[in-house]
Image (cartoon, grey):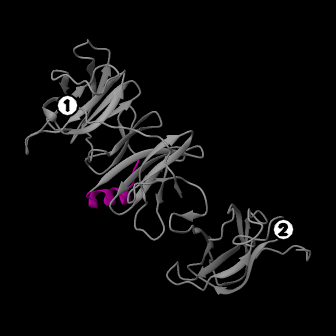
Amino acid sequence: SYIDPPDAAASFAKIALPDDFECLSVAFLATLFVFVRKSLVTGTRSHRFYWSAPNDARSVDDLAFASAENSPDPLLDVAVVGDNLAMLGAQSLEMWMTGGTVDLPFNRITQRMFAKGIFATGACAEHDNTLFYVGHDYTVYRLTDVPTRISDHGLEERIAASETCECFPFNWEGHQFFAVRLDSGTWCFDAATGEWCEMATLTRSNWRARCATMYQGVPLFGDDTEGKLLRFGGYSDTVADLERVFTVAVALPEPAHIDSLDIDLSIGSTESLSGEGDDPVVEARLSRDGGNTWTAWMPCSMGQMGEYRKRARWRRWGLCDAPGALFEVRLTDPAPFRVSRAAVNEGGGGRSR
């Protein structure tokens, strides 16, 4: 959902960089701002990065630079990893550390150069106490002792087919996510579970969020279209009612009648006492052919506030056989939706419900 930006006036001024070079990426470490330089001449390669005066990004000396040139590929990005700098090139990764002289405050760490470069500028982020990035070989890496592959072949095919790649981290409900935003969609890696999920916005082919920051423990996202701020919350997805859907699969080794589908969810917990959401309705539908065709949606009341003994039960689904029964359950009404169990052909309770 959209939120209003904070009421704070901010003024910005252009930073004068040596030779007025184009800056690809900026990092901050040990009171110094670090700028990655793009080559001024088309077709040439730049390995240079510059640093500012302590705590003053506006002051960058013409001679305050070094080169990440252990490999001949151009430098595309820089990221802070703990108290080190990761210099990411088109085909290699170098680690630099602080503790040098006043004239050269950063030194290359020997034996910490890897032949795994970055896909594009902006395709990396410090996350979960290490570096995550999309490699030049379309693989997503997590930096441990060496870059470790965390992507699967399906995602790597999508990265290879995408012209753009933007990455950003965020935390939500105890989970640390690393988002990879491509032309065709956005996928997030959960560091807690080691699994990937896809993020999307209703009525659109891609998620509206293209960047994120944490504010008071809550992720705020930058909208890719209107320049607004977004956050998780509410029961709408910017322009449409939020549709929450989950799937129940039932394997059937032989034909069987499905007389009932029971779902244990947040019955009688609606927050609305009148109007929309006062008596929320959850819907279910069935596919007998693996999701190719579906029955019509069948409604079931979730109960008004306090009706905790209601049951979400759908009856008379009919005969099913191989490949089995596939149910989809959805809720679009503004009410909590927490699912804890699903069962078919379960014995009923008393009539007091």
Q: Residue sitting at 36 percent across and 37 percent down?
A: 11
Q: Residue furthest top?
A: 101
- Identify the image quadrant of the N terminus: bottom right
Determine the secondary structure under disc 1. loop
Seen in the image, is 291 located left or right of residue 318? left
Residue ID for mark 2: 307
Magenta part of the chain: 150-163
Residue ID for mark 1: 17
Q: Confirm whether residue 250 shows in the render.
A: no
First in residue order: circle 1 vs circle 2: 1
Seen in the image, is 65 located left or right of residue 198? left
Residue 264 percent across, percent down from the top left: 74, 66
Task: Identify residue type, mark 2.
Answer: Glu
**Residue 67 belongs to magenta span:** no
Nearest to viewer (mark 1 / mark 2): 1
Q: Residue sitting at 56 percent across and 83 percent down?
A: 294
